[in-house]
Amino acid sequence: MRKTAIFLGGGASAAEGAPVQSMIFKKYFTALRAENNYSDCTLVQELRAYFKQMFYIDVLQDDLDKIHFPTFEEAIGLLDLAVRKRQSFKNFDLENLAQNSNRIGYIRQYLVLLMAGVLEDKTSVVRGFHRELVERLNEFGCLRDTIFISTNYDILIDRALSFRDSIAIDYGIEFTADRKKAGLLSLPQSVSLVTLYKVHGSLNWSYCPTCNSVKLIDQQQGILNLLTDPSQARCSQCQSVRTPVIVPPTFFKDMSNSFLTIVWHKTEMSLNDIGHLIFCGYSFPDADMHIKYLIKRIQTNRTDKLKITVINNYPGKKAEKLDEEKERYLRFLGTDIRFTNNTFEDFCRQTENFIE
């Protein structure tokens, strides 16, 4: 049997209750105001200043229901482009000799941590679709021949795979400390090693830039320790503060992390062996040129035809949006694609109807 690759986009997480990108800021600041305990928080005050100057929004005073927030991509993309061009905005500098330099760098980190906080809060209790998918694949004997690729930072699919003791996850990279949990040691016959490549990083990975090592964290809360308890986020070997391994969804993706480079390389090598690629909850956005490049390489550098299925519907989705997404797929990958009107929930509950 040729292997199947299941590509998980943001829509797959949204089906579980995770917020879509366009709602991240509203959800964060709504929850923040409900807590009403932020007057001395540097992160909040800095984010307030950034949104006020750059987007004319007062996140602590304006009516959140009437605010047109920028997307996460737009908010962080401005900072990424400024770093690339070695330019600054008024009151938001790159690193220099001033005492409070590199404000752009701090704001960028704060935006990443904001996103991590929202995803942790909204995905701790889930509907169980990812787990149902794993169970169905296992029941029909397809799990060993399935490769998971995810652009999502949350650990919904990680938790679904880890739910069974008979499954170990291969992320494509080696982690420090407990390698057994990473599924990288020799495994007994009864344990299935399932491949999961998270090409944009993950909330359960933390990177030490001094040791050049990645640690696998049991809970997403480990990333949030950068805010709540920085001492817990320090590397046990050199005491440097670890950073999230997250590539935000911008046009200007920084793919320089050596571990992500390994993940991307192994993803391409693995995809060369598949016969069927199933996109779930992925709209093929223009910003994901790295993904498009990867898919085009594995589509063209093969002797046989790659079967492609798209599952990206959801209740209430407008026909115009479906047509736009279909046009993006057809324009880039050709016309021989199987489009469905099914949802991610349909796929998880009737997996055998899609895996051929």
Image (cartoon, helix red, strand yellow):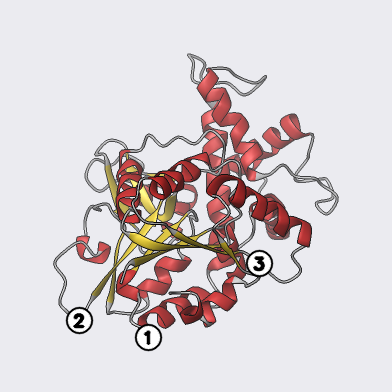
Disc ID at residue 12: none
Secondary element at tag 2: loop
Q: CA distance from mark 2 to mark 1?
A: 15 Å
Could you say which quadrant of the image residue 196 lies in? bottom left
Labels 2, 3: front one: 3
Q: Residue at x 48, y 55 (%)?
A: 153
Task: Name the mark nearer the viewer: 2 or 1.
Answer: 1
- Residue 29, visible in the rendered structure: no
Residue 183: name its quadrant. Answer: bottom left
SS at badge 1: helix
Mark drawn on residue 139: 1
Q: Give SS at disc 3.
A: loop
Residue 151 image point, x, y percent: 48, 53
Judge left or right: residue 260 versus residue 182: right
Residue 92 lies, with reference to residue 137, above or below; the image says: above
Identify residue type, mark 2. Answer: Ser
Please tell me the numbered disc located at residue 190: 2
Comes first in the chain, label 2 or label 1: 1
What percent of the width, then of the height, locates residue 272?
33, 53
Q: Nearer the viewer, residue 320 or 187?
A: 320
Q: Nearer the viewer, residue 267 or 187?
A: 267
Q: How many C-alpha atoms fall within 10 Å of the one at disc 3: few (<14), some, or many (≥20)?
A: many
Disc 1 marks a residue whose amino acid type is Glu
- Rendered-image quadrant of the N terminus: bottom left
Q: Nearer the viewer, residue 271 or 184?
A: 271
Mark 3, residue position: 313
**Counting other residues with Cα less than 10 Å from the Cα at mark 1, is it few (<14), some (14-19), or many (20 or more)?**
few
Task: Please report whichever mark, 1 or 3, sits nearer to the chain's N-terminal start.
Answer: 1
The residues bearing labels 1 and 3 have C-alpha atoms spaced at a distance of 25 Å
Work out which residue is located at the far bottom of the displayed protein and give it. 139
Tell me how far mark 2 sits from mark 3, CA to CA.
36 Å
Q: Is residue 299 above or below residue 121?
A: above
